Image: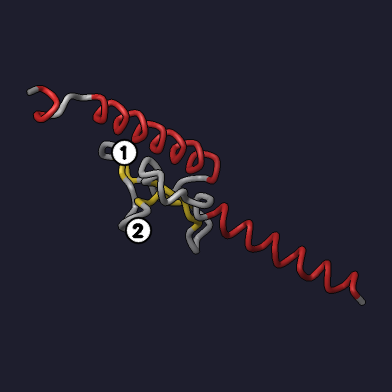
Amino acid sequence: MNDNNDKCHQTRDADDVSVWENEGGALDHSNMNHHYGRRIEPDGSWTIYHVFTGLPADMGSRPMAGLGETDATATMIILNAHNAKRRKAASLQPTFATRL
């Protein structure tokens, strides 16, 4: 009887992990570099979205919707890495107060 309960919990846990991964994984809320997540749409396509607004991201003039899972994952990683690099570069720029 416990085996059935364990299998049920394992299946439920696997489903929870799947949903979590579909949403781009757990966000580190203290890390402001992760602005983009991914989600699966009802039609089975994937969308990269801005995690703070929920709106689909765009890359230049290309909307980040209607993607395959692999493209969505790779592009989400690239966008977050680019954002981290941009924010780091901005933090290294001297501010008005530090120039005085």
For label 1, the crowd category at 10 Å Cα-Cα, with few meaning under 14, some 14 to 19 and many 20 or more, is few
Residue at 27 percent of width and 36 percent of height: 60
Given the image, on which type of amino acid does mark 1 rest? Met
Place of residue 80 in the rendered image (x, y in percent of width and height, measured from the top left): 40, 38
Q: Name above or below for residue 97 compared with residue 42.
A: above
C-alpha gap between disc 1 and disc 2: 16 Å
Along the line of sight, the residue nearer the viewer: 52 or 32: 32
Mark 2 — residue? 54
Closer to the camera in the image, 95 or 49: 95
Q: Which mark is residue 14?
A: none
In percent of the image, x 10 and y 22: which residue is there? Answer: 99
Task: Residue under label 1, please give it.
Answer: 59
Give percent across and percent down for residue 27.
47, 50
User: In the rendered structure, which amino acid carries the disc numbered 2?
Assistant: Gly
Q: Position of residue 28 (x, y in %)?
A: 46, 48
**Mark sitting earlier along the chain (1/2):** 2
Residue farthest along the front direction in this orientation: 100
Quarter holding the C terminus?
top left
Query: Do residues under tags 1 and 2 come within 8 Å of each other at their CB atoms?
Result: no
- Secondary structure state at the residue bearing disc 1: strand
Q: Quadrant of the N terminus?
A: bottom right
Q: Is residue 99 left or right of residue 93?
A: left
